[in-house]
Amino acid sequence: MSDTILVVDDDLGIQKQLKWSLTDFNVVFADDRSSAIAQLRRFEPKVVTLDLGLPPDPANASEGLKTLEEILALAPNTKVIVVTGNNDKDNALKAIDFGAYDFYQKPIDSDTIKLLINRALNLAKLEDENRILAKTRPAMGRIIGNSDAIQTVMRKAEKIAGTDISTLLLGESGTGKEVFARTIHEHSPRKDKPFIAINCASIPENLLESELFGYEKGAFTGANKTTIGKIETAQGGTLFLDEIGDMPIGLQAKMLRFLQERVIERVGGRNEIPVDIRVICATHRDIQTMVGEETFREDLFYRIGEIPINIPPLRDREQDIVLLARTFLNQYREEFNAKAKSFSDGAMRAMLAHRWPGNIRELQNKLKSAVIMAEGTVIQADDLGLLEPSEDFESEILNLREVREQAESKAIRKAYQRADKNMSKTAELLGVTRPTLYSLIDKYHLEDLKTGV
């Protein structure tokens, strides 16, 4: 199937010239801004040639530049080659500044414009392949998910893992902040050293300082021997401070000094002890509001959050829910030697309709209970403690191609999970042949299904 090229030009002579020059492509035409946008939506061309002199202002480039802006706003990966008058280099350069791929000055030479289009098309295809690869290749082993929301966060975590930059993980309870912290550690140069986690909210305020910094013998009643704290225990590795937002304001000053100087003093001690560790913090609180309310030190906030990472809640990761549920099902089935192997359609719909206020931790708990309590090999909505929805509500999308693509992609993923990742059974559930299934997987860029991710 030949690639589609959109030619935006109100000159019928140039339209004809390009039609005969570009016989290797499916060429579609538009002669003003509104028809150009309509054709862009309909055909989604990877390359557009755009004459800047469009009606109602063909003598100037204003309408052409507006068209360029609209094209790139709707389809930012499109390669736009602007075509200008012979003495209009300023507007050509302005178009490049707006995001055009290249420019070409009239009169049009068929061989040259063909070469420019081929180069633009090859670059567009290469960028598409790179985006698909980045989306489907596993990034960080412990983290499971194919949704755009989690993939974006995984890439960010992957980039910072090789550095010692301070990282603040933000997100609701149960979103997997400790899993992210461990994964960052495991992909860092410190991976062979300790990973030490401490929850600042779970330790009484009067004990947290000695738990973190350690204490000398005789420092307080009951201190019968010198004890090193969590910070020293993490020497050479990573310290994960969970729920840092619950750290007492008085202890925050001592923590700030440690982070700035990289030395500590044990409780009751006078000697400075150098410490070489990476610190990752996490909280479910709105820590910026706490800074404004002066319940969290502003200087400590900036020290721990050089790069913040917002971990999305499970309700924003709809396409990951079934994937996570099946992963936990397999894990708990082995752990509890249970017979449950799959989910009923009602259980699937119930999981997708549930809002998951407790996020992944809630999903884990419901799956653990369901695996133990299920009577047969198939988990029902009741086993999960969920109500089966009566209707499947979808967000309104008006573009028919997008509606079809989303519906087919979703159906393929659901069938694949229900078929236990068996391609033949997936095709059977969908009512298509295996070759057709593979064609649809290629069409909708579902390459992770081929690799069983």
Image (spheres, rainbow, N blue to C red):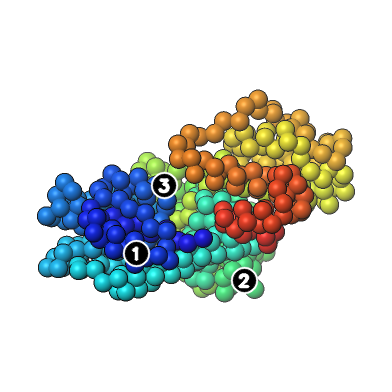
Relative depth, front residue between 28 and 434: 28
| Residue type, numbered disc 3 | Arg
Q: Quadrant of the C terminus?
A: bottom right
Residue that badge 1 annotates: 20
Q: Position of residue 144 (x, y in %)?
A: 63, 55
Callout 1 secondary element: helix
- Upstream in the sequence, badge 1 or badge 2? 1
Q: Position of residue 258 (x, y in %)?
A: 47, 64
Residue ID at (23%, 63%): 83
Q: Which mark is residue 42?
A: 3
Callout 2 secondary element: loop
Q: Nearer the viewer, mark 2 or mark 3?
A: 3
Q: Nearer the viewer, mark 3 or mark 1?
A: 1
Callout 3 secondary element: helix
Query: Taking 389 as reference, is 207 above or below it?
Result: below
Residue that badge 2 annotates: 191
Seen from this angle, which residue lies furthest top?
A: 390
Q: Nearer the viewer, mark 1 or mark 2?
A: 1
Relative depth, front residue between 230 and 405: 405
Q: CA distance from mark 2 to mark 3?
A: 50 Å
Let me know if residue 150 appears in the view.
no
Q: Which mark is residue 313?
A: none
Q: Position of residue 399 (x, y in %)?
A: 45, 40
Residue ID at (38%, 72%): 119
Identify the image quadrant of residue 292: top left
